[in-house]
Image (tube, rainbow, N blue to C red):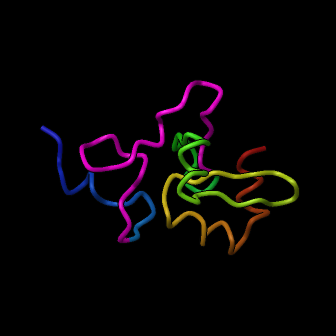
Amino acid sequence: MANDTQAASSCCSTSSPNPAATSTGHDNLLGGGADDLTTCPVMVGSPVSKQAAESVGLFRDFESQRYYFCCAGCGPAFDADPAKFAANMA
């Protein structure tokens, strides 16, 4: 039995829901094909659909590279130290 509170919580400890959650009422950022998938540089290992993340503004450009995020809390974290989080994707 799934814990509904956990499914609605953010992966980044923010009040924003995790858009990668697949439960009812949440956007599914895993909707694209295999070529569309990447991982979040802040929450390493969290899969993200590039197309879906871009459509809701969950991305940043740093040193000519685009980084996609799993939730709204990851953008500000990335902004605080983009080089650190970009290194997670290397």
In the picture shown, does residue 76 fall above or below 64?
below
Q: Nearer the viewer, residue 30 or 87?
A: 30
Which residue in the rendered view is the most extreme toward the front?
55
Tell me residue 75's x, y (percent): 60, 66
Image position, residue 27 (x, y; %): 38, 48
* Dominant secondary-structure state across the stretch colored magenta: loop
Q: Residue at x 27, y 42 (%)?
A: 23
Quarter-of-image position of residue 62: bottom right
Q: Residue furthest top?
A: 34
In-front residue for pair 69/36: 36
53 is within the stretch colored magenta: no
Q: Residue at x 58, y 54 (%)?
A: 69
Is 48 on the left or on the right of 79, as rendered? left
* Residue at the image point whose x is 31% and y is 60% from the top: 9
Q: Is residue 53 above or below residue 71?
A: above
Q: Quadrant of the C terminus?
A: top right
Point out residue 35 in the picture as x, y percentages from the top left corner.
65, 27
Instruction: Please identify the quadrant where the N terminus is shown.
Output: top left
Residue 18 forms part of the magenta stretch: yes
Q: Which residues are magenta?
A: 15-40
**Residue that appears at 87% across and 59% down:** 63
